[in-house]
Image (tube, rainbow, N blue to C red):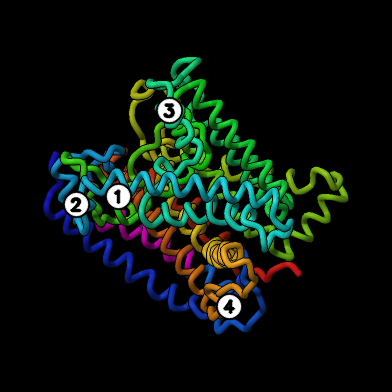
Amino acid sequence: MARPRGSRRATRQATRRTVAAAVATLALAAAAGVASAHELAAREFTTPVPLPLVFAGAGATVALTALWLGVADRGSPGGPEPASDESAPSRNSRRRTVATLPAALVRPVALAARVGFLALFLAALVHGLVGRQVAAENLATLVLWPLVLKGVGLVAVVAGSPWRALSPWETCYDGLVALEGREIAVLGDYPDRLGAWPAVAGFVLGVGVLENLTVATRSPGTTVVVAASYAAVMLAGGAAFGREWFARADALAVLFALLGRVAPTSIRRTDGGALAVALRAPWTGVRAPLADPSLAAFVVAAVYTVSFDGFTATRTYRALLAATRDALGIGVASVALYALGLVAFLLSFALAAALAERLGAGPAADASPRPRWLDAAVGFGGTVVPIAAAYEVAHNYPFVAANLSGAVAVVRDLARGTEGDAVRLLAGVSVELFWGSQVALVVVGHLVAVVAAHQVATERYGTGSAARRGHAPFVVVMVGYTVLSLWIVSRPLAG
């Protein structure tokens, strides 16, 4: 059913007011706080306003935006954008094409990107074994954790996920397919019942525990073992279950695909084989429901894990860790803290989904084979992606920039046979400016999430009053995430 013109006008006006409402908070916070993120030296400085006022202002901005949307936009915003690249003309009209890559260039550019990325991955593995075992001087630690894991994620947030074109293990699988002359799936099709749970497990263990809680990221040898082992598991899974394995079981593919939903650019293949690049609102892609509950769990785990990563750099965490070690022992304290926080985040999201269904009077019980609260979690799960994306960028862009400059310097020195100083990106960025950018990204990400959740609630629950009731539990959760994120980035680094 076509959306009333008055409703569309109200949505545009509400969006303008959303942006305006955020400006005061962003301006207030831009000059305040203390940085706590990878690779940027921190120092304390005096804030022009008390930090509790910044937290309250940011939380109020998110809550009032949700309230205003519920009052101003009483029409249906239409359904979510289809997950595929092909969409109806009415959907295409929402995008504005800004560039097109001719079909004649698509294949050679894609081939060069795949071969180049595989060569970089292999070079990092080799240098991790034969190069100096110093984190700041070895391509394994400079490339695999910061650039492959974090850097590709930043690209996905801006331009959509490039991983299916870059994945080293999928490139190797394609080589095997070319030699075999057919698709390889020794054990048959990927079991649907597995969903993305292998990717959830891989993300929690690989990023949540190994990257955040161990010294693996500072050991070239350990990094090589981890990366090579993961590549072997991915190749074995691909050989067993075919290409679907890479899309659903690869933690990196799932993470980057989810982050790509929030990208303001949309890349699609035209009928003639060209690639068209279009602009879209950042909440357009995240309104689509997730495929299954495992992806909802993955999104929540991603939000929690990047927040926990920032939390581990604070003095508060160090004090809590020391107390936990006294109670549980050194070997399990940090993992126990991570696991308890993850469970708390998952339960908070599940509770919000259950309350949303109860308050919004959602679809009938037989509308889905899943329980109603689980169906709501899947429907609203994508709207949490902007929060994960915003904090991913805010927390990691200095880390990526610093290691990119280090990797370039190592490659240069290897080519010349001499050593030189690296050009440090972001070297002139002050702590005040950096923290201000973190606050801006966190608040904007939560605003985008609130807009998307409001639109999903309106589509799911039908009437304006039901949508406001159904949206309310997620607003509470998102305000909590906002304040928590800002509190983490305001803490001084642990000395």
- 4 or 3: tag closer to the N-terminus: 3
Tell me the CA gap for discs 1 and 3.
Answer: 27 Å
Tell me the CA gap for discs 2 and 1.
Answer: 9 Å
- Residue 94: image tag: 2
Say which of marks 3 and 2 sits in front: 3
Please, what secondary structure does the residue beneath circle 2 have? Answer: loop
Looking at the picture, which amino acid does disc 1 mark?
Thr
The quarter in which the N terminus is drawn is top left
What residue appears at the point 43 percent right and 49 percent down from the top-left corner? 259
Count residues near mark 3 (Cα–Cα under 10 Å), then give few for <14, some for 14-19, many for 20+: many
Q: Which of 373/255 is in front?
A: 255
247 is within the stretch colored magenta: no
The extreme front residue here reads 417
What residue appears at the point 30 percent right and 50 percent down from the top-left corner? 284
Q: Which of 473/319 is in front?
A: 319
Looking at the picture, which amino acid does disc 2 mark?
Arg
Q: Which residue is mark 3?
A: 243
Above or below, 372 against 487 in this view is: above
- Residue 431: image tag: 4
Count residues near mark 4 (Cα–Cα under 10 Å), then give few for <14, some for 14-19, many for 20+: many
Q: Determine the main secondary structure of the stretch shown in magenta.
A: helix
Left or right? Give the position of 236 relative to 353: right
Q: Are marks 2 and 1 in contact (CB under 8 Å)?
A: yes
